[in-house]
Amino acid sequence: MKFSNNTYRSFFVLCAAILAFFVIGKADAACFECRENYTSVEQVEVSDELFNVKCSSKTGGVLWWGDPFYGTVPMGDMPENIEADYLSEPAVVKPRVDYEEGTSDHLGYFPCSNCHGVFVPTPRSSKDRKINAHQDVVENSLELKHGRGAIWCLECHNAKKRDYLTSHRGDLISFNQTQKLCGKCHGQIYRDWRDGIHGKRIGYWDKGAKKRWWTCTECHNPHDVEPAFKALVPESAPHLPRGMDNADHERLHVDHSGLSHGDVTDGEPTTASHGEAATDTTAESGAH
Amino acid sequence: MKTDEKKENKENLEKEENSCCAPDNGRRDFLKTAGVTTAAALTGAGALLSGSDEAEAKFHWAEWFQKNYRLMTDEEKEAAVTRLEKRYSEEYDKNVTVDRTEAKDGVLFGYALNIQKCIGCRRCVKACVTENNQSRENTQIEWIRVIRMEKGEFSQEFMDQGSPQISGKHGIQSGGHRHKQAGVVLEGQHYYEPEKVPEKDAFYFPMQCMQCENPPCVKVCPVRTTYRDPDGIVVIDYNWCIGCRMCIGACPYWARRFNWGEPNLPKEEMNPKTHYMGNRPRMKGVVEKCTFCVQRTRKGRYTACVEVCPVGARKFGNLLDPNSEVRKILDKKRVFRLKAELETYPKFFYFMD
Ligand code: SF4
Ligand code: SF4
């Protein structure tokens, strides 16, 4: 078979169009990592047929990690006088803010210094007071739950340099390294986090191999601390085995005396026992 | 495919074909003695007979008559893998690789799951399906199960519901709270579907293959197609599995699944990075189960379920490395193994903060 140059050209144009459609189409797909509406990741084709993530069509959450390091940056300097994995292996994080560009995908008002220090004056006293501002971000700003009244904004946010958080001594802490801040009070959890017991890491399991670490605020909302982890829509239940109409059998409580609990009257059994129900339905089971 | 590769392939196929008829063969002996004709056998034979294309027929023929993977020479393994790559690539319309990385020295895989953290969202279940090419609709298979357990309800109201029931005596042999499920492992719900998780009155208990150090499933397999690899992963050579389901009966952890029907794996959802012992597409009539994502973990990567868990309840690593995440958990936390009394010694630990 022979193709003219023209045929080739139109073929390529067509391919390019299809490709463009896919790339543009795919860029729209985004899913959330841990906190809905707060930590999202866009789906991109990182190499041939390999996507950085796959998203759940039911819940909109990440369902699968193809490229664990997409969009991450090195974790940066960490205290050196403590034992921790990040001293001996490459640790990366997904930045909450980009200090060089002065932008943030996740913090709505960033950079905070656009207002603070410009037309919002730096407070002269560090004494706490009720604040009306930012109730869209900090719903409970008038009754901050975190610390149950023991702390307020400037315990964590640097009073003078609002684009940063603050250590006990007033040193700057990046929004990308919130663990340095949270570890001030939550020491036990911080230690577990350093050991990889608390929190989440993805990438390579081996010691010395690269990992992406999740930092505190990627899973927890520091302002609204209850519950510690916000409820999610679960992925769908397994299909029922063939021949089973519902899963009522597992909702009935087992009563080995032949009575199903809740329907017990004085000596009068009223419904089939759990045991019988289970035998009937699992006999033709396809999924077991 | 390049011409040399093709040629090599063909040679391999021929080699396979010749070796197919070697008389001494444990599996076929078993079949003969037991007089069992499995669904798988029929399917395979059917495929052979109906294969109109001669090359394709040869291909299936060679696959059907390959040896038990463990007894294959290195060349035979390579040939088997190449054959599969070719077949899968055609079938799924993409470049499918079938890896055969072996266990590494100095590695014993272990897993730890924080049941205090798990919120029952089932993302691990679906991540596993996505990664490991499980069957989707109709013949759905999921390797991980998440069990919803009740926190239990204790109140005055049940006090007089004991048994036998003698009014006013509040039960004699068993009390009115005898069916309250608090803390009763394995009596929970599997098909729960609330709007949001976690629910107030429940906690969640995920289960999957525990890669037992003393695996009963391995002991009962009559054709020894499921075995424990040196890094502790219990694997299955699907090609050698006769579908007798002895292992399903032997496993105390509800970990193994049988392909009752033709697996349903849509092309566009198929994960092309596979391992011979792991997530390569399975066929009707064989058993499958979690392999700790052997295709990932033998290359250093975390399992898909570890990576997807939104609360970080899942931890994985090398039990021989005192600095690994699992070992640190064993050092610092209270852990337990499910059904320890059975002496299966799972390498899957549950822990709490
Ligand atoms: S993904 Fe994590 S939290 Fe969700 S069910 Fe699995 S183990 Fe539990
Ligand atoms: S959990 Fe079951 S399938 Fe897995 S190794 Fe143990 S006995 Fe075998």
Image (cartoon, coloured by chain):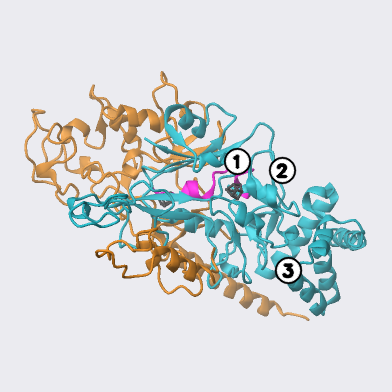
Chain colours: A orange, B cyan
Q: Is residue B176 above or below residue B322?
A: below
Find disc 3 in the rendering and name its residue: B38
Q: Secondary structure at mark 1?
A: loop
Q: Position of residue A25 (x, y in %)?
A: 45, 68
**Residues at badges 1 and 3 in contact (C-beta under 8 Å)?**
no
Which numbered circle lies on residue B300?
A: 1
Instruction: Give the quadrant of residue A256.
Output: bottom left
Marks 2 and 1, the one that precedes in the sequence: 2
Label 3 sits on a secondary structure element that is loop
The image quarter in which residue B57 lies: bottom right
Does the segment drawn in magenta span residue B263?
no
C-alpha span from label 2 to label 3: 30 Å
Q: Picture coordinates of residue B118 (x, y %)? A: 38, 47
Whole-angstrom CA distance, mark 2 to mark 1, is 12 Å
Chain ID at mark 2: B
Whether pointer 2 and pointer 1 mark residues with C-beta atoms closer than 8 Å, the reply is: no
Q: Which residues are magenta?
A: B295-310
